[in-house]
Image (tube, grey):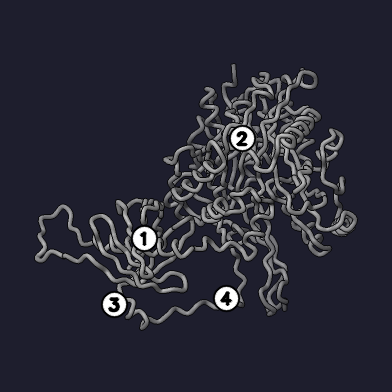
Amino acid sequence: QTFEKLLIANRGEIACRVIKTCKKMGIKTVAIHSDVDANAVHVKMADEAVCVGPAPTSKSYLNMDAIMEVIKKTRAQAVSLNESICCSFISSLFLQASEGVTFIGPDTHAIQAMGDKIESKLLAKNAKVNTIPGFDGVVKDADEAVRIAREIGYPVMIKASAGGGGKGMRIAWDDEETREGFRFSSQEAASSFGDDRLLIEKFIDNPRHIEIQVCSIIYYLVLADKHGNALWLNERECSIQRRNQKVVEEAPSTFLDPETRRAMGEQAVALAKAVKYSSAGTVEFLVDSSKNFYFLEMNTRLQVEHPVTECITGLDLVQEMIRVAKGYPLRHKQADIPINGWAVECRVYAEDPYKSFGLPSIGKLSQYQEPLHVPSVRVDSGIQQGSDISIYYDPMISKLITYGSNRAEALKRMEEALDNYVIRGVAHNISLLREVIVHPRFVQGDISTKFLPEVYPDGFKGHKLTDLERRELLATAASLYVAEQLRSRRFLGTPRIPIAKSKRSSWELSVHLGDGIYPVAVSKDGTSFSVEVDGMKLNVTSEWNLASPLLSVTIDGTQRTIQRLSRNASGDTSIQFLGTVYKLQILTKVAAELSKYMPEKAAEDTSSILRSPMPGAVVAVSVKPGDTVSEGQEICVIEAMKMQNSMIAAKTGKV
C-alpha cells in the first residue's frame, strides 16, 4: 500500500527524478510551477500541474500559501518539498495530519535542528560527533564578527545558519574581508533562505569534502522515538568545488580506509538517531590530510549528488524515502549495504568556466542531445531542446553520471560522455569538467577543496594542446574544410551532367590557430584524407556526415569525437576538440596571401566602462553621477542565481 497522489513542490531535475520513481510505484504526481516554467519538463511529466505564481522563487516555489492551496485543491496525500521551504510550512503540514497529508522527509524537529547550522553543531557535540572549532552563537554585526574572527584566528568561514548550496558563505583572511563577508553573507542568506543569521568557525585549510548518506527510519509518528533503525550508505567525495559549490562528485572516496569509513558512518548514524531522523539525509564532514574529520552540516533532503550513492548501492533513495514516509520499516541492514563499483557525477552548468571557474549564462537551448548512447551513463536533467535558462533559477543543465567496475573505467566513460554531450545556445562548463577528470592529480586521487585554484592559479584557460594534439586538430579542421568543399560541388536529384568532370584531389591550405599560422596540404584517398602538417603526414578517416552535431574522426588510429559549432564564408570555424572550443580560420593558400590587405576591426575601448560579466539584477548602487572613484572601489552589487557579486572600478575616474 502506498500514496495515491504526491505533490512535488520543486522544479528542474530533482522534480523529474521524484516523478520517475512515483511512476514506477504507481503514484500519481502533481507538479507546481511558476509562469515562466509553464512548459518545463517536470510540468509535462506530471499527471497534474498548477501555476503558483510569477518567476521569482519567493513568489512561486517558496510561496507557502499558494502551495497549501494546491495541496487542498488537488487532494494530494503526500508532499515532497523544495529544500528551501521554511520549517513553519512543514509544521503546518503536520497540523493537517488528520486530513491525511504526509511530508516525504524527516519530521519537523529534525529539519529545524539540522536546518539551523548553529543548533545542529550543538546537537552534534552532544552526540559525540567531531565538530569544527568556532563560535556557537549568532553573530550580531560586523564588529562582533571581527572580534570573534580574531579570537578564533584567521582564516575563518562565515556561514549562513540556514544556508546551503554555497550561498551565504565567505572565507575571510583579515578584518576587512570579515566585514565584507558579513555584509554579503547576511544579504544572500536573507534573499535565499529568509534568515540572515550567521555563524563563524575556523576555516580548515586544504580539506576534503566527504559526505555520508544516511537512510534511517523511526516507526511512523507514534513509535518514532523508540523503535528506530538507522544505517549509513557509504560516502561520497565532493572536494572539487568552486565558490563552495560542488562541481564533481564520486563514490566511494579514494581517500578513506575501511576504519575511517566505519568511524565516520557510525558518527553519522549517531547524529541521525540523536535528532530522531526518519528519512534519507546527508551528513557532511571535512577531512584533513591526517584523516581527522569534522562535522560540517546535515542536509535533511535528497541531495543533488545522490545518484552516485544509488549507483554503488543499487538502492532507489526516492523509493526508500516514500516507503519510510508511509510508515514501513527499512528493508536492509548495515551488512546489506555494499560498495559495488565506482560512480562519478559531473554537474553540467550553463556557465562560462573562463570567468571565475563559472559565471552564469542565460539563453535558449537551440540544440540539446544527451550522451545516453554511451554505455553506463545516466543523465538527470529537467530541460530539453528549446528550454530557456533564465536568471531566476540555478543554472544547472543536468547531472551527468557514469558508472564502472572501478574508478578508471568510470572516469574513461565520463570522458567519452562529455565529448558526446551536445549543448548549443548557452555557454557551458563541459571544457572545465573534462579537464578536471583527466588531470593527473585528479586521476591519482590527490584532490582537495582547493583543487581548482591550485591547478589553475591564473584561472581556467581551457585545454592546452600538445604538439601531437595540435597537429590532430589542424588535420581534422582541414579535412572538414575539404569535405565541405566537395559536398558543395555535388548535385543531387537532377539530371544535370557536368561539362568537365573535376579531378582535383589535393588542396593547399593555410590554417590560423591561436597565434600561429600553419601551412597544411590535404590529399583525398577514397573516404580518407592524407594531411601534411609540420612536415608530418596524418591519415584522417570519418563518415563525414556534416549534418550531424557529433563527428567521430579517426586520426592515425586514434578515435576522437568532435563537434563543429560554427562556420562562415570567411573561413572562420569553431571546433570542440577534447572538450575545449577552438577558433580557427581556414583559407586557401591564395586567399591567405590576399588576407593581409584586409583591414582589421579596432577593438572596443572598455577601460572606462564597468560591464557585468554575467546577467543578473542590480541590487545596490554605491555611487552616483559626478562621484570620483578610485581603483578597486565598489560601484554596484549584482545578484545572479541567488549569489551576490561586488562590481568594482578598474581604474580611478569620475562617474
Q: Which mark is residue 590?
A: 3
- Amino acid type assigned to the residue bearing label 2 in the image: Thr
- Label 3: few (<14), some or many (≥20) within 10 Å? few
**Which of label 4 and label 3 is nearer to you?**
3
Who comes first in sequence, dot 1 or dot 4? 1
- Label 4: few (<14), some or many (≥20) within 10 Å? few
Which residue carries the number 4 mark? 606
Measured in 3D between alpha carbons, the distance from the residue under mark 2 to the one under mark 1, in whole angstroms, is 40 Å
Q: Nearer the viewer, residue 306 or 339?
A: 339
Say which element carries label 2: helix
Which residue carries the number 2 mark? 309
Say which element carries label 4: loop
| Residue, far top | 1
- Amino acid type assigned to the residue bearing label 3 in the image: Val
Residue 491 in the image, given as x and y percentages of width and height: 17, 57
Who comes first in sequence, dot 4 or dot 3? 3
Q: Quadrant of residue 205?
A: bottom right
Measured in 3D between alpha carbons, the distance from the residue under mark 1 to the one under mark 4, in whole angstroms, is 36 Å
